[in-house]
Image (cartoon, grey):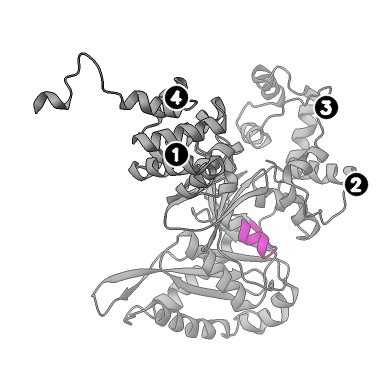
Amino acid sequence: MRKIKAVLRLHFEGDLSQRAIAKSLGISKEAVREYIKRFIAAKIAWPLPENLSDAELESHLFPADPNAPRKAEPDWALVHCEMKQKGATLAILHQEHLEQHPDGIGYSRFCEQYRKYTLSLKRYMRQTYPAGERAFVDYAGPTISIANIQTGEVRTAQIFVAVLGASNYIYARANWSQSLPNWIDAHIKFFEHIGAVPKVIVCDNLKSAVTKASRTEPIINSTYQNMAEHYDTAILPARAYKPKDKAKAENGVLIVERWIMFVLRKRLFTSLGELNVAISELLEEINRRPFQKQDGNRKQLLETVDRPAMKSLPENPYEYVEFHRLQVGLDYHVQLDDCRYSVPHTLARKVVEAQLTVRTVEILYQGRRVASHVRQDKGIITDAAHMPSEHRYLAQWNDGLALDWAGTIGICTQQFLEKLLAEKRAREQGWRAHHALKKICEEYEALRLEAACKIALEAGVRSVSRLRIILANQMDRNPLATAEQEANFDHINIRGANYYH
């Protein structure tokens, strides 16, 4: 699915450039421009209607048009890199492009697009950041030890560092690891600490932030992106091996390592909370320390420059959500940890997206929620509404339902089925007996089944097959003659009781 909604949100509400939107979402700038252009041409109002799904929006913006095929274009970043080599010319590179894509763009178009690409490249190094625009986040390299007095176990804490672009205000917090839950929690605490949200967050390419690192099209972790949407901000990963993209974060980490971690190196900490209290005390001192080459300090600039230009916090803090892409099994269940959750049976073998919170599990298909469950540690969670009708009937079947049906036929049928169910040890055996009686009732009329069950009860019959014999031989139509025939023991080959006395 295209990231159309995210592009439109950052364009209309985030007030970001198309290049910043492209880098944040890991797509090309041309794609961002095309989405916005098509959205305006479609004359759809912003904000979008709540019931408009991703698939419907994409169909409005990209209607099928088989008569207008799009010619393949090269990777302009790769072309630009090739042009730096000695002897390279646009004519040679265009010829190589046509060898790989015979239906590619022409030479004049190739040159025009490449010149546009080179004009879009930055040609300056010094960067200035508007008030409230950016925050740079990273982890410090060294760690701080925390000892458990009761067990003697020693664990190390990771130090999260955030620096604001305009005021250079520094925030730091200790977490147990760099895992995704701790990474998200550190951002939430950072926003709550400064009481506002910057427009852009520049991060490193750690796994908790970036699923797939790329110099041109990084893929943001789904949970991290979801948190950014909740706080109405954008994620902009730094390019790999380009520390200058987050120079302020590097400088902030250096200050934290020198003025906090080195100062606390000899102290013994017994809990994470104790360590964070010590860090906050030293941070307050650092942020109130006067600048050497300008008036004021980081704390003052936060209050007067950065915070007034930032976005306000949402009413509710972000609730941690994990995202997983899963394929539904033939049993219309998806596996999450040690538990299986049901989805509508029509989605069997389809790929769905699961959203996990602390308490709930929501399953989405093509942007629509199709299932919601209470999160469990293990087991199988099945919603009866997700099952096919035949599976639902089998799952809800019980002895009471079977006997209620038999009661509609007659008292003898009910008593006969009750005796059958009493002798069955497995639930499936009882269901099969009930199903067999229903099949007999379809083959013969209900009155004959009732009469046959009466004969079977009197004769002590306890099987469905014997009941079928009674009906097949029409013994239910003349029960008295049958009883006399069964009770008559006079025969020349039978000695009788008098023979032994």
**Compared with residue 240, is residue 319 higher up or lower down, i.e. above or below?**
below
Number of other residues with Cα within 10 Å of mark 3, as a class: few under 14, some 14 to 19, many 20 or more: few
The first of marks 4 and 3 along the sequence is 3
Q: Nearer the viewer, residue 311 or 427?
A: 427
Marks 2 and 4, how far apart at CA: 79 Å
CB under 8 Å between discs 2 and 4: no
Q: What's the magenta region?
A: 226-235
Three-letter amino acid code of the residue under disc 2: Lys
Marks 1 and 2, how far apart at CA: 59 Å
The residue wearing badge 1 is 431
CB under 8 Å between discs 1 and 2: no
Q: Secondary structure at mark 4?
A: loop
Q: Nearer the viewer, mark 1 or mark 3?
A: 1
Q: Which mark is residue 475?
A: 4
Q: Pinpoint residue 342: horizontal percent, then vertical percent.
A: 53, 46
Which quadrant would the C terminus be assigned to in this image? Answer: top left
